[in-house]
């Protein structure tokens, strides 16, 4: 049973996600992009094109196609992919991996891609369960260092205050629930359900008590009645990969896996076939529905000809997510061959891709993005500090200025100051180099560096 504990008063904690502020593509009713909306800035042409792709996906017209986002580094390719998933609806799976992640000594490349695809296909299931349901009045998510990488912050637990018309209850949940709360972008004012047994989270909508007309594409629902903990029809989303692993675990892997918990590195194709048959039965009985999500492959040029061929074949399958790839390369060799091609991809694959290009941000757009990031990271800046940070972003790179922003916020808090000053930005920019400065430094000491 998942660990959920009712508690008294406690400390507040903060959460920060790279794209947690993105609500959608920021399009109006005519499909035209607003300059700043839903957490996105600029890239008007690319966002409008992505909106048309979303419409194609909703109408089932994307079969046999995939999307390629092409543009310089730091131009919002990942953000647009996340926004596409948000536009497709609540609970739509979004899976991100790099083209280099498929190379593993333990598993085949095609197995890694197949697993990612099945993680990006959701199955919405309806069941009667004991759930915690209510409007989120307070949400504090505690993050800590990953056990696998101490420099990466991951959710460790969350403290949630849920309110109904009759009751208010405060509960503490474990890392699995905390991760789902972050993934679904749950904020104060949302109405949610949490399965008390396995901790699956479902977002019902936005409470009428907290509705703001600044929020778009939100389902408005009344604050729930009755107690917080109740028996109710619980609608949640499992992925095909979740079901694969549940069936594989049930079938067992021999005496060693039974006692030692040894897990198979690859899922048997027979298991996946059995899952597909079961899901089809549920759909026909009306107990479930399929939710194709988004599989986003960054640095797609790093995939070799075998992996690209697998993607090309998978695009024709019936059970396939929306495949979105991104690259910042021009004419380069297709990995595993001596053939040069645009974006490092075979021409027959490129002919079947919907290609969307992104452009570098202008200074005004950099300023708007920095404002959004500062608000998300709860960093207050003086106006001249924002001016200097905007200039750095336009001259060097947006990613560099965002990094400087985060460091400046830490420095100001360490000095017990509420605002970041221009002097903070100048000092940090002097201490931390961008890519070009770092390369120049290496060239300066080229003869003294190890070969």
Image (spheres, rainbow, N blue to C red):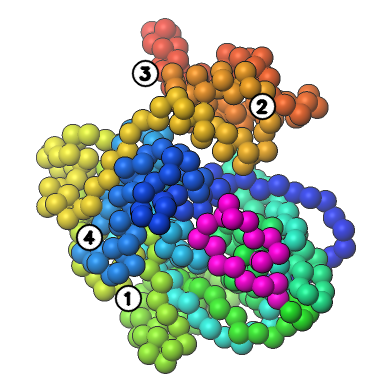
Residue at disc 4, secondary structure = loop
User: Does 153 sit above or below residue 387?
Assistant: below
Classify residue 333 by image quadrant.
top left
Q: Is residue 230 visible?
A: yes
How many C-alpha atoms fall within 10 Å of the one at disc 4: few (<14), some, or many (≥20)? Answer: some
Quadrant location of the C terminus in the rendered image:
top left
Give the residue pinned by disc 1.
269
Give the residue pinned by disc 2.
381
Give the residue pinned by disc 3.
451
Q: From the viewer's perspective, is the residue at label 1 or at label 3 nearer?
A: 1
Residue at disc 2, secondary structure = strand
In 3D space, how far apart are the residues under numbered discs 2 and 4 (Cα atoms)?
Answer: 45 Å
| Region rendered in magenta | 207-224
Classify residue 165 by image quadrant.
bottom right
User: Does 278 sit above or below residue 242?
Assistant: below
Q: From the viewer's perspective, is the residue at label 3 or at label 4 nearer?
A: 4
Q: Nearer the viewer, residue 124 or 390?
A: 390
User: Does 109 sit above or below residue 333?
Assistant: below
Q: Earlier in the sequence, mark 1 or mark 3?
A: 1
Q: Position of residue 8 (x, y in %)?
A: 87, 63
In 3D space, how far apart are the residues under numbered discs 3 and 4 (Cα atoms)?
Answer: 45 Å
């Amino acid at each position: 049973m998942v660990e959920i504990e009712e508690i008294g008063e406690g400390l507040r904690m903060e959460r920060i996600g790279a794209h947690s502020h993105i609500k959608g593509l920021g399009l109006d009713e005519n499909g035209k992009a607003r300059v700043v909306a839903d957490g996105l800035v600029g890239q008007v042409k690319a966002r409008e094109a992505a909106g048309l792709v979303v419409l194609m996906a909703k109408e089932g017209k994307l079969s046999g196609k995939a999307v390629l986002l092409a543009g310089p580094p730091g131009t919002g390719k990942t953000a647009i992919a996340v926004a596409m998933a948000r536009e497709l609806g609540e609970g739509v799976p979004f899976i991100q991996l790099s083209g280099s992640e498929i190379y593993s000594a333990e598993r085949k490349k095609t197995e890694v891609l197949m697993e990612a695809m099945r993680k990006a296909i959701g199955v919405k299931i309806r069941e009667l369960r004991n759930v915690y349901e209510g409007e989120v009045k307070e949400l504090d998510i505690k993050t800590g260092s990953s056990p696998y990488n101490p420099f990466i912050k991951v959710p460790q637990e969350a403290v949630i205050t849920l309110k109904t018309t009759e009751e208010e209850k405060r509960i503490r949940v474990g890392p699995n629930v905390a991760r789902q709360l972050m993934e679904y972008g749950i904020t104060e004012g949302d109405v949610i359900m949490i399965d008390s047994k396995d901790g699956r989270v479902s977002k019902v909508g936005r409470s009428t008590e907290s509705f703001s007309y600044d929020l778009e594409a939100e389902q408005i629902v009344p604050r729930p009645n009755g107690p917080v903990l109740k028996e109710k029809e619980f609608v949640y989303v499992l992925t095909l990969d979740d079901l694969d692993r549940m069936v594989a675990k049930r079938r067992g892997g021999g005496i060693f896996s039974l006692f030692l918990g040894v897990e198979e590195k690859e899922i048997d194709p027979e298991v996946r076939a059995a899952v597909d048959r079961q899901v089809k039965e549920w759909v026909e009985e009306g107990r479930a529905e399929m939710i194709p999500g988004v599989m986003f492959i960054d640095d797609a040029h790093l995939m070799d000809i075998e992996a690209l061929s697998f993607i090309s074949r998978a695009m024709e399958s019936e059970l396939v997510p929306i495949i979105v790839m991104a690259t910042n390369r021009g004419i380069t060799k297709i990995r595993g061959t001596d053939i040069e091609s645009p974006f490092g991809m075979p021409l027959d694959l490129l002919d079947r891709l919907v290609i969307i290009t992104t452009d570098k941000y202008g200074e005004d757009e950099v300023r708007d993005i920095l404002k959004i990031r500062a608000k998300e990271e709860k960093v207050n800046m003086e106006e001249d500090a924002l001016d200097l940070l905007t200039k750095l972003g336009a001259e060097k790179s947006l990613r560099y200025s965002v990094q400087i922003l985060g460091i400046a916020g830490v420095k100001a808090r360490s000095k017990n100051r509420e605002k970041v000053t221009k002097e903070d930005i100048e000092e940090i920019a002097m201490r931390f180099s961008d890519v070009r400065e770092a390369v120049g430094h290496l060239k300066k000491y080229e003869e003294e560096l190890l070969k």
